Structure formats: C-alpha cells, structure tokens
Image (cartoon, rainbow, N blue to C red):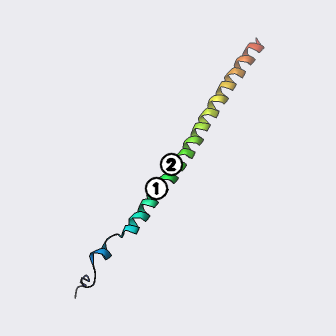
Amino acid sequence: MAIEPRTTGSSVSERHFRPVHGAIVAATVVVAAIVAFAAFSFVAGVIWFTVKAVVVVAIVAFVVRLVFRRASR
C-alpha cells in the first residue's frame, strides 16, 4: 500500500508563498547584507590597521638602526 499525496482540500495558495512570506524573505536578505557589510568592513579595517602598524614599526626600526649605526662610528 503506497502513501498517496493529498489532493483534496488543498488550493494553490496553500502550496505557494504568501506575499507576507516574500516580504519577510526580502527583509531577511537586507538585514543579512547589512550585517555582512559591517562584518567585512570590520575585518578589512583590522587588517588595514595591522598593515599600517607594521609599516610604521618597520620605518621606526630602520631609522633607529641608521642612527645607532652612525653613532657607533
């Protein structure tokens, strides 16, 4: 005995998204896009800050090395 899908009493509107569901999906997509943009901006900002800090430390170390090299002669 096979299980048959129910065909009586089901209308087309029960099997498809209602307009409210579409609005909820659209709102979820907008919120997800905003959160993703904020997260990406945060990560990119942290990486950019780290790169700038490394460059500044490297320049300062280079200048200090040059000064001490000249002072030891």
Q: Give the residue at x 46% y 56%.
A: 30
* Image height of 35 relative to 12, above or below: above
Label 1 or label 2, whichever comes before in sequence order = 1
Residue lying at the far left of the rendered structure = 1
Quadrant of image for the N terminus: bottom left
Residue 41 position by quadrant = top right
| 69 vs 9, nearest the viewer | 9
Apparent side of residue 8 relative to residue 28 in the rendered image (left or right): left
Apparent side of residue 1 relative to residue 63 in the rendered image (left or right): left
Quadrant of image for the C terminus: top right
Kindly indicate whether the residue at mark 2 contacts the one at mark 1 (C-beta within 8 angstroms).
Answer: no
Residue lying at the far front of the rendered structure = 19
Q: Give the residue at x 40% y 68%.
A: 20
Secondary-structure class at tag 2: helix
Q: Position of residue 66 (x, y in %)?
A: 70, 17
Pointer 1: what residue? 30
* Image height of 40 relative to 17, above or below: above
Secondary-structure class at tag 1: helix
**The disc label shown at residue 43, or none:** none
Q: Amino acid at mark 2?
A: Phe
Real-space Cα distance between discs 1 and 2?
11 Å
Residue lying at the far bottom of the rendered structure = 1
| 41 vs 18, nearest the viewer | 18
* Image height of 43 relative to 28, above or below: above
Q: Amino acid at mark 1?
A: Val
Pointer 2: what residue? 37
